[in-house]
Image (spheres, rainbow, N blue to C red):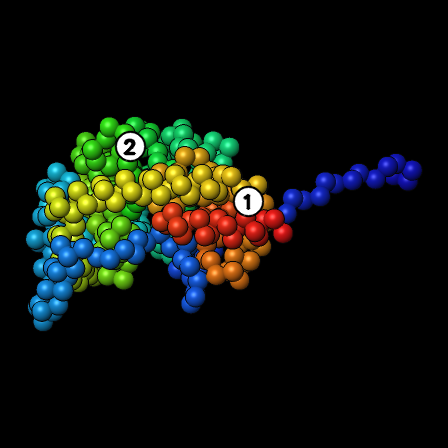
Amino acid sequence: MRGQPTETLPEPEPTRPEPDLTHHGDAEVGEGLVDLAVNVRRDAMPDWLADPITAALGDLAAYPDPGPARAAVAARHGRPPAEVLLTAGAAEGFVLLARALRGVRRPVVVHPQFTEPEAALRAAGHQVERVLLDAEDDFRLDPARVPADADLVMIGNPTNPTSVLHLAADLAALARPGRVLVVDEAFADTTVAPGVAGEPESLAARRDLPGLLVVRSLTKTWGLAGLRIGYLLGEAALLERLAAAQPLWAVSTPALAAASACATPVAVAAERAIAARLAADRDHLVARLSALPGVRVAGRPASAFVLVHLPGAADVRLTLRQRGWAVRRGDTFPGLGPDWLRIAVRDPATTDAFTEVLAEILET
């Protein structure tokens, strides 16, 4: 009616663009850039790993035989071979899951985490639900946040990109009959804890949890991203379903040789030593970053990378590229935004050089 005040509607909140789930750290790297964007270790390959891979090149006329490598991986984790499925990198495991488990009704992915699991599910036609962990809680898992009727749950541990190591008990609380619980342990071999001889909070040896499927990768610590080797650990019946969706001879003979070599006691001991050195290098990186104005390191990093919050991070990332440094943008991970960056752990000299450049950029 005339004379009555006009109701003012609130301005709608701006919607954040949907994250690009197909963006990965290798897209950040370019010629002449120091790579702090990809979480792959680049040290020289030890002879005990290089020699079997090289020897396998003489057997390329024969079709790959996964039997010995499967048995070696199974022995490492205290499982029968039927509970191991070798894959062309961990990423193939996510594709197999998405294709083989088409009957799931409520798949849930816990974010922020590696985006390939959700991307594979969506590509296979699944309607994916997200559980977004909170930065204020250091991206820690609260099992109660996951819907009780979710019949497929995916989570990383330690999680990429947050570097959070969730408690094994919290993850185990998510397992239940009728649900497939996928725990991505691609970076489990980078973790250490005082008084723990092996990998803290890993579920790789757990055979008592219904529906548990552990995803593992050998490409990070051993610098084998180009070789493509990983594996799945879980109930034999579940792995049979996944194997039915896998192409024949999916894993090459050199990759199988690498899997066998990385399962030996020599390899495991070397892996633990590398993880201990990585922890010291990570502490150095965290200390240098924490001393910079406006930079906040998320939580308590436990892996080969750290996540930082920095207002204006998108512009800082571009300026870093101009200065010769590549870091991983955070806005392609659900639950993060343009003010987040992921930075790979490198040796102290590289860290010092990087943080000096970052300090100069922040000063201007």
Front one among 308 and 79 = 308
- Helix, strand or loop at mark 1: loop
Quadrant of the frame with the N terminus: top right
First in sequence, mark 1 or 2: give its number: 2
Distance from disc 1 to disc 2, alpha carbons, whole Å, reads 28 Å
Q: Amino acid at mark 1?
A: Leu
Query: Residue visible at 46% across and 42% down?
Result: 288
- Helix, strand or loop at mark 2: loop
Query: Residue visible at 40% across and 41% down?
Result: 284
Q: Amino acid at mark 2?
A: Ala
Front one among 263 and 215 = 263
Q: Is residue 247 left or right of residue 72?
A: right
Q: Which residue is mark 2?
A: 193
Q: Is residue 85 left or right of residue 4?
A: left
Figure quadrant of residue 113: top left
Front one among 346 and 238 = 346
Q: Give residue 310's mark.
A: 1
250 versus 81 height, above or below: below
Query: Residue visible at 35% across and 36% down?
Result: 165
How packed mark 1 is, by other alpha carbons closer than 10 Å (few <14, some 14-19, many 20 or more), is: some
Query: Where does residue 86 sit, x and y in percent of width and height?
Result: 18, 53
